[in-house]
Image (cartoon, rainbow, N blue to C red):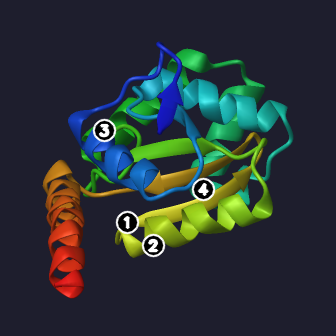
Amino acid sequence: MYTKNNDITLTDDNIAFLDVFAEALPFDIVVTSGMRGADAQVRAVFKKIELGDDINALYGDNYANKYKAFYQNNDFAGAVAYQTALYKNSNTPWTHGGGYAVDIRTRDLTQSNIDKMIQVANNLGVYQVILETTPPHLHIGHYDAATYQKKNKLSITILGLIPLIIWMIKK
């Protein structure tokens, strides 16, 4: 099972992924981000800068250095315009802005639980898994809803056959 705050926006694609992902985990998870617009992305990156995160290692020098300049100049509006253009001109939708990424809180999970989440995400064939430390979360870039609806239907079909198989074995 997963929970989220009411201010977190999830797309149908986020929900389809999370339904399958959470069902495969033996513990509950907390979603801290899903679909987010340019302003929310800017707030998230500015927060990472405030907390001392190495955003160059995470995002690459070009993006990180532009964000650092926006932050140092207290230019929130400029950063939003920059992020909006990035979202608009991106060749790939596999981001929070495209609605194809979720963040899962890790600060209250054991390393074993984090490892299990990474394993399950990779088994689902996601696009990207990044364990971030500031603030502590697992970023998962995933594909569209159809990808996970098929996996969920297959799981339900297999689970539905188990009683029949047991009945046949007992006969």
Q: Secondary structure at mark 2?
A: helix
Marks 2/1: CA distance? 6 Å
Q: What residue is disc 4 on?
A: 59
In the rendered image, the vertical position of residue 38 relative to residue 100, given as above or below: above
In terms of secondary structure, where does tag 4 sit?
A: helix
Q: Position of residue 97 (x, y in %)?
A: 36, 37
**Nearer-N-terminus badge (1/4):** 4
Residue 116 appears left or right of 78: right
Which quarter of the rendered picture does the C terminus lie within? bottom left
Where is residue 155? Give x, y as percent.
Answer: 23, 64
Sequence-earlier tag: 2 or 4: 4
Label 4: how many residues lie within 10 Å, few (<14), some (14-19) or many (20+)? Answer: few
The image quarter in which residue 71 lies? top right
Amino acid type of disc 2?
Asn
Q: Which residue lies under the disc numbered 3?
A: 15
Residue, disc 1? 126
- Judging depth in this view, the residue of 139 and 161 nearest the camera is 161
For badge 4, the amino acid type reads Tyr
Above or below — where is 105 with respect to 9?
below
- Mark number, residue 122: 2
Quick one: 46 or 72, which is closer to the camera? 46
Among numbered discs 1 and 3, the one appearing first in the sequence: 3
Q: Secondary structure at mark 3?
A: helix
Disc 3 to disc 4, how far (Cα)?
26 Å
Chain-order first, disc 3 or disc 2:
3
Are circles 2 and 1 on residues that touch, CB within 8 Å? yes
Pointers 1 and 3 in contact (CB under 8 A)?
A: no
Q: Nearer the viewer, mark 1 or mark 4?
A: 1
- Total residue callouts: 4
Residue 152 location (% of width, % of height) = 22, 57
Quarter holding residue 141:
bottom left
CA distance separating discs 2 and 4: 21 Å
